Every structure is written in structure tokens, then in C-alpha cells.
Amino acid sequence: MGAKEFGYGRRGGVKCLLPETQIIYDTPDALQAHTYINRGRPISPFPCPSLINSGKELGMAKQELVWFVTGASKGLGLALTKRILARGDRVVATARNPRALEPLLADPATDRTRIFVLELDVTSPAETVRDTVSKAVEHWGRVDVLVNNAGMGGGVGPSEEQGVEHMMEVMRTNYMGTLNVTHAFLPHMRERRSGTILLFGSRTAYRNEFVGPSAYAASKAAVHAYGETLRAELAPFNVRVSVVVPGYFDSGLALPLVGTPIADYDAAREELKKRVAMRDRLPNPGDPEKGMEAIVDVVRGEGRAASHAPGVLPTWLFLGGDCLGDVKARAEKLTQVVDAWKDVGSGLGKEDPAWF
Ligand SMILES: NC(=O)c1ccc[n+]([C@@H]2O[C@H](COP(=O)([O-])OP(=O)(O)OC[C@H]3O[C@@H](n4cnc5c(N)ncnc54)[C@H](OP(=O)(O)O)[C@@H]3O)[C@@H](O)[C@H]2O)c1
């Protein structure tokens, strides 16, 4: 799958979002005469926000942010896109299948001058991703906030049953995909000496000591480590980086049992099935709208985050009570293990006393 623009009009390099059509307009008259068609029904003259295509020319309010969201077709990405629009910001909503965004675009409550849709598979070749990012930046003259939301649950199963190919696919989407999109944005944000990058990790990176989640947990642990380092690397350029760590949010993220059964794991697999069924019956899962609203609050330093130092993002943004509990438990376990085994791990410096 490649990344290509989804339905925009063009005149002299100036683009307009045209959901549901791939028509390229050659003259402004043709463009203006066009009526936006929703499933065959004309619903309104099509607005063309990018006839003026830089943030400055658009006369954006000073505090107005331009977001770029991957995996905006459904789940948390779609919820975030809606929250961004509701707060008066602009969003480049990207999806493997942009048609999934049609209902949002057709909703009369959606201000279509604030949303620009592009097709993007985050596992596309780096060059294709860079091309999509250039189009996004060109549209409103800048992107302030990159949200690497796209990801796959990848299912669960004993690691050996999941197999190397499947585990690599999960890594390719969740980690390499995040890397791919982020790197395409780095020159833009470095040059502007401004920007915010969010990477979606998971509390599963901290709660994984049971049969089943290895592919997903490992891919998210990679995202965490990458984000933590990137944060230090980009701080001198005034680019903020934070790893968003959601607990369980009722988004529809699928957790099928995957892999080729191996008899030795039969009992473990049965336990895993019960665990997955329990997750689906949890009484109070996270609400995607509330979780995504919290993200907008933190990026903008408003609402729930208003009491925090302005402009400061946490290294990890832990979302949901289950996440907070699991991360604390992991932190305590790390401390316990360090203490319990320091007799073995310490005193190994060439010259004693070791640093520890
Ligand atoms: N929900 C949770 O409880 C939870 C917890 C922790 C972390 N997260 C993380 O939050 C993020 C969103 O998850 P979700 O719960 O909203 O899951 P979801 O409902 O399954 O949505 C996943 C999104 O990622 C997109 N995607 C998958 N592979 C892609 C690719 N190669 N290129 C572009 N887009 C791709 C999907 O697009 P398609 O529509 O084309 O499939 C979809 O838009 C993920 O990174 C996930 O790991 C979720």
C-alpha cells in the first residue's frame, strides 16, 4: 500500500480537500463550480480551505494548532480527531483507507475547513511517507503536533505459536511505522525549532509477565525506548516528545488468539482465552473520548493539565486507572529485583567500589 492524497483539487500547486473524489481540477472555475457529493447526494458547496495555503495566510488564531494523526479511521485515532476539531484546532487525518472518514466528513457538525484527509499506511516506504508528510505540511504551512497513533493489537498467543513472521509484522507496524512517520517530520520540526511528537506506547509494555502478549508488548516497549531517547535528542530544538501510555480503552482494538497451536501450550492457551474474555467484560474500561480529550489538554496545557508547568510534557503520559496501577506495580517490582539481586550485579567494576 502506498500513500497518496485522497481527493483534493489542485490549481497551481494549491490544494483542496475533496472527500469521495479523486478529481483533479485545472481551473479555479471548475473547482468553485464543484458541489461536494456525499454518496450521490449534493450536500453543500465544497469548502476550499487551502486556496490560501499557509498558516499565516489562513489567519489562524495564535493558539490554533495543526495536528497530524495516523490511524484516524477508527478507535482512539478517530476519537482524537474529533476532540481536536471540537477544540477548534486543525487536523490532517490520515488512514490506510480514507473512506473510513467519510461519516465524519459528512457530519454537518464537522467543520470541513479544519480537516484534511490523506491516505497513509505507516509501513509504506520511507520516501512515500515523506511525500505524504510534505503534502500535510504544505496544506496549512506547518504541522505542530504529530500523533503516532496507528497500531495493531496483533492478537495474543504463546510466542512460539505466534511465530517470527507474525511478530515481525507487529513490530513493523507499531515500531517501524512510528519511526517511519516520525523521521519524516524531524527536518520540518527541527527547522522550525518547534513541534510536539506523541508516540503511542501501551501499559502492556509494563504488564506482560503472562502467556500471550509478547509481540504487542515488545513492539510497544520499543516505541517507549525510542521515544525516551528522542525526547532527549530533540529537546535542544524545542521539539517536545512524549510517550502516550494508554491502559485499556474500549476502542475496538482486537485481541484475537493467533498462531499455530502447539500441543505443549494447550493449557496455557486455555488460560489465555479466559484472560481475554475477562478483558472484554471489564466493568469500567477507558472511554476513548475522555482519554483523547486528556491528550489535547496536555498538549495545549489546558483543562486537566492546566495546573502543570506551561509547555511541559511528561516523558510518559499514563492514561487510565489500570495503567497507573500497573506501571506503579512494575516500578516497585523493578526496585525489589534490583535490591534482591544487587549482591550479584554490583561490584563488577574494574576498580572497586563500583558505581552502584
Ligand atoms: N485501545 C486500547 O486499549 C489501547 C491500549 C494501549 C495502547 N493502544 C494503542 O493505541 C493506538 C490506537 O489503538 P486503538 O485502540 O484505537 O485500535 P484500533 O481501533 O484497532 O485502531 C487502530 C488504528 O491504527 C490503524 N492502523 C493499523 N495499521 C496501520 C498501518 N499499517 N498504517 C496506518 N494505519 C494503521 C488502523 O487502521 P485500519 O482501520 O486501516 O485498520 C486504525 O485506524 C494503537 O497504537 C494501540 O496500540 C490502545
Image (cartoon, rainbow, N blue to C red):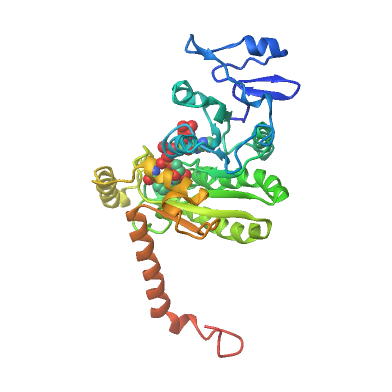
Q: Position of residue 105 (x, y in %)?
A: 49, 24
Q: Position of residue 82 (x, y in %)?
A: 45, 34
Q: Is residue 153 visible?
A: no
Q: Quadrant of ligand 1?
A: top left
Quick one: 297 or 239, which is closer to the camera?
A: 297
Would you place residue 279 above or below residue 352 in this image?
Answer: above
User: Which quarter of the image is occupied by the N terminus?
Assistant: top right
User: Viewed as shown, does residue 11 lie left or right of 215?
Assistant: right
Q: Residue at x 67, y 10 (%)?
A: 30
The mark total stands at: 0
Looking at this view, name the residue that lies furthest to the bottom: 352
Q: Is residue 301 visible?
A: yes
Q: Residue at x 57, y 90 (%)?
A: 352
Would you place residue 329 above or below residue 284 in this image?
Answer: below
The answer to which image quadrant residue 12 occupies is top right
Would you place residue 280 above or below residue 97 in this image?
Answer: below
Q: Position of residue 326 (x, y in %)?
A: 35, 60
The answer to which image quadrant residue 32 occupies is top right
Quick one: 343 or 2, which is closer to the camera?
A: 2
Looking at this view, name the residue that lies furthest to the right: 12
Q: Residue at x 48, y 80 (%)?
A: 345
Q: Position of residue 41 (x, y in %)?
A: 47, 9
